[in-house]
Image (cartoon, rainbow, N blue to C red):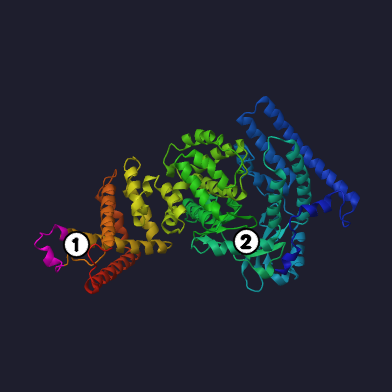
Amino acid sequence: MARAAAATVFSPELLASRYGSRPVKAIPDASRSLRVALRAAEVLSKLGAFGLKVFLDEQRGQSSAMRRARAVELRTILTRLGPTFVKIGQGLSTRPDLCPPEYLEELSELQDSLPTFPDEEAFACIERELGFPLDSIYSSISPSPIAAASLGQVYKARLKYSGKLVAVKVQRPGIEDIIGLDFYLLRGLGFLINKYVDFISSDVVALMDEFARRVYQELNYVQEGQNARRFKKLYADKQDVLVPDIFWDYTSAKVLTMEWIEGVKLNQQAAIEKQGLKVLDLVNIGIQCSLRQLLEYGYFHADPHPGNILATPEGKLAFLDFGMMSETPEDARVAIIGHVVHMVNRDYEAMARDYYALDFLEPDVDVSPIVPALKNFFDDALNSTVSELNFKTIVDGLGAVLYQYPFNVPAYYALILRSLTVLEGLALYADPNFKVLAASYPYFAKRLLTDPNPYLRDALIELLFKDGKFRQVYVLVKWNRLENLLVQGSQDREFAAKDALQPVLKLLLGPDGEELRVLVVKEAVRVTEAITFGTLIDSYNAAPEFLKPLISSGNPAGPFKISEAEREQMIELRDRVFRIWGLLRSSDGFDPTILQPIVQVLQEPEARVLGSRVAGGVTQRLAARLLQQLLRTPPAPGSS
């Protein structure tokens, strides 16, 4: 970790001292001033000319086609201005509050493809940073980089001491100085925009500082290694997610050595299928992992473009490049689910109020003008069932609303939207009918059944039960809420009980279903007890009056030594289960073949184990009840 001490952190004061009117002595004043002036002239001339064109377009009335042409022009300008502006363009591509939809789409195509720097400089950097000759570290290293980006380039090597294949990322020489000068100039431009440009409501300097801090974090490769280690600990516990190991003895602030991962980029469909893999399976893995990042731990990959996600020959999804990470505040994780629920329910006033909880708006901003804009777009977008919604359409529509009003979208929210949009785009290329929200349901179902947060559980119920395929997921744990939802659902033509069984059973018997299985066993025992005792109580009540004293041994309270309150609870649960079964049977498309998936899964070992656990639990519970009946003193009549 001592090697990280040399890493530079973003500091506006440091930039001002290095490039401002009173520079540090290490930089000659004349050459420094000339360099700053030349770079300022280059940046201002290109961006200024572009800004003037956009202003004239606005005066003439800008069409969508014209905005598209200007967006292409801006992408070209940012690429030519170098790595700082490529990074800024990529950042802007996630900010619907700052850019119109045409710009968002075009800037999202910006790539880190810059010319490589000389290999001799890269190898010299490795030796200088690690303190050893190159041939004492590696038994072999590729003579030229296998990949290059704006901040560095990557070599393939084999460690001498262990023989392991590794990827060695080396930072571009002088990149700190290049980026530092650019951010110094851009901060100055930001001050001018804040002061003189009224139609931009966001604090441009604050946005620039936030983004600069992220870029400077990317320059610290030790920090990137720590990010990878944390990401691996949180998410690579699943068999289908792979995160490379970091070799700390060969890592410094400017050199990162990590495990070599064989794989194919996720956007190379033909190569993936050649390995016998399916793009949609890999995308589903990515969606489940992205949802865990967003909603469980809040720590997520902030640069999820296809080049950073590989499909391994074993069918795993490998994440690379952990320079830019972000975190979702805990309160926001629940607020995001609530926002989706309000959208599905077309509760646009609640949607608008959500923007306070999500920190999109200051508390003093009036949201009432935003409600009609949300209604105009989403009333059209929500004409299909939830599972059929196209995620990109929703993001684009929401982005258009955000752009029109004084929103300040937090970076975490914009980045996670981009992550899911990228995954959906890859899936749509393989299957035009793919829907990312429908693919998210198994994750939501698990969270619904296991999450301790009651608000989140209720929000998930509302979300999932808007779609017919998942209306009975919650039959296992939430009987009282389920009945009302099924009554409403039975009036919906999309409601079909049969369709829900397969995903529920897959979730229940899968490797991640242990928490759910515990709940199933507990609930099955409870229901079995209620049905058994309820049936016995009904039989006793139906018996002729002259037999009741014989059955109860003269006990006026009846044959069962349980309290009146417990008796009522059992009867209510038993009756509710029967009513729910009746509702399911009355749903459209119900027929005896609904049991076929159950018969199939009962043949699997996991199902037999689960059945044994349920049977054992029921046996123990009924045995305990029998002993209770034999040993307990009968309660006094009327006691509870």
Image disc number at residue 227: 2
Q: Residue at x 69, y 43 (%)?
A: 203
* Relative vertical location of residue 352 with respect to residue 271 in this rendering, above or below: above
Q: Earlier in the sequence, mark 2 or mark 1?
A: 2
Q: Quadrant of the C terminus?
A: bottom left
Q: Residue 537's image quarter?
A: bottom left
Image disc number at residue 536: 1
* 114 or 486, nearer to the observer: 486
User: What's the distance in space between the residues labelled 2 and 1, CA to CA?
Assistant: 60 Å
Q: Secondary structure at mark 1?
A: helix
* Relative vertical location of residue 434 with respect to residue 618 in this rendering, above or below: above
Would you say 601 lies left or right of 35 here?
left
Specify start and end residues of the magenta stretch as a single range. Answer: 540-554
Furthest residue toward left:
546
Would you say 272 lies left or right of 247 here?
left
Q: Residue at x 35, y 57 (%)?
A: 476
Q: Residue 524, percent across and down?
A: 31, 61
Q: Residue at x 81, y 45 (%)?
A: 39
Q: Is residue 366 magenta?
A: no
Q: Residue 532, percent across and down?
A: 23, 62
Q: Residue 492, percent across and down?
A: 34, 40
